[in-house]
Amino acid sequence: MKVHLYRDSDVFYNEIVRALKENSAENSLFLGLLQQTIRGNNLPLFMCRAENDVFCLQTIPNQAVLAFKTRQPSASTMNMLVQALKDRPITRFIGVKEPVLRLVHLLAKVRSSSVLTVMKQRLYQLNHASLIPLTSGTIRKMNREDLPFVAKWIQEFDDEANLSEKRITVKEAEKTARQQLDKGGLYLLEVDGIPVAMANATRKMGQSVTINLVYTPRPFRKKGYATSCVTALCHQCIKDGFSVVLLYTDLGNPTSNHIYQEIGFEPVSDSVVMEVKKVD
């Protein structure tokens, strides 16, 4: 069987949901991004599946997210996908650790390129029974008056997190801030009336929601504000009816991983962000 390419996002999504129903949590990034493109009527740059085990989605230049029905796809399935990707302008791959590592090393060999680990991540899911009580400060939804400093925080977050190959510009950060305002998922923690941290509830799929964009500006750090912000947002998500609350962390930041486990999050799986590039 050859790799199947898609032009219809809805057909692609429906097939993926059926294939990944047993492990939708660890593939939540893939499913959420695809659902967002469908809601926004934006056709992805590339969509494909190899057999019914491995799925690839490209929504931005140079980067693709991978989803897996099993963490051990067959060699033939992986080689099929490598052949489909070898000439495509995709250099960065995101997904569950074990199969992504296999894929990028196979692809690097075909491209005569090198492999670089950009980030090691861990996916957590909230254990509602372990969620700690609300702490300091209060959260509120972002409003239009917040746009200037939220855009600045988003740019600072991108600079520190290294989530994309190129750092976002001021205009791109402002656009992202406006998009978050329209979506209504970004919350700010206020202490004595001053915004000190932010967190975002996104990729809402049925009973599942993911928290991202957790950020505290440097002047407000080491005061527990990120913990308070995420804790309060978790309580808000539960109040809004979500039974599955997910969150990704950078394994290079042991402090945040410890904090989230204290809040009540438990590890689900590890994922990686990898690059396949020719090195001069």
Image (cartoon, rainbow, N blue to C red):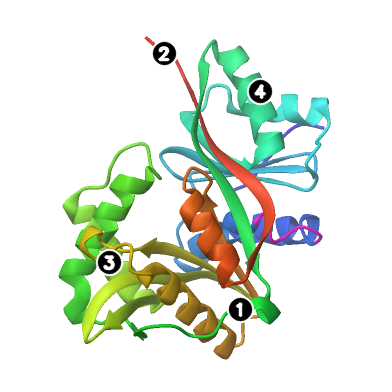
Looking at the rendered structure, the kind of residue marked 4 is Gln
Looking at the rendered structure, the kind of residue marked 1 is Leu
Q: Quadrant of the N terminus?
A: top right
Circle 3 is placed at which residue position? 177
Q: Earlier in the sequence, mark 1 or mark 2?
A: 1
Q: Is residue 265 magenta?
A: no
Q: Relative to 212, does residue 78 appear above or below in the rendering?
A: above
Q: Which residues are magenta?
A: 22-27
Circle 4 is placed at which residue position? 83
Magenta span main SS? loop
* Among the 4 quarters of the image, the one containing residue 146: bottom left
Circle 1 is placed at which residue position? 131
Residue 216: image location, x then y, percent = 31, 64
Q: Residues within 10 Å of mark 4 (few under 14, many from 20)?
A: some
Q: Earlier in the sequence, mark 3 or mark 1?
A: 1
234 or 70, which is in the foreground? 234
Q: Relative to 201, does residue 257 appear above or below in the rendering?
A: above
Q: Is residue 24 magenta?
A: yes
Residue 78: image location, x then y, percent = 74, 29
* Mark 4 and mark 3: Cα distance apart in space: 38 Å
218 left or right of 57? left
Circle 2 is placed at which residue position? 279
Q: Relative to 80, does residue 137 appear above or below in the rendering?
A: below
Residue 275: image location, x then y, percent = 49, 29
Q: How many marks?
A: 4
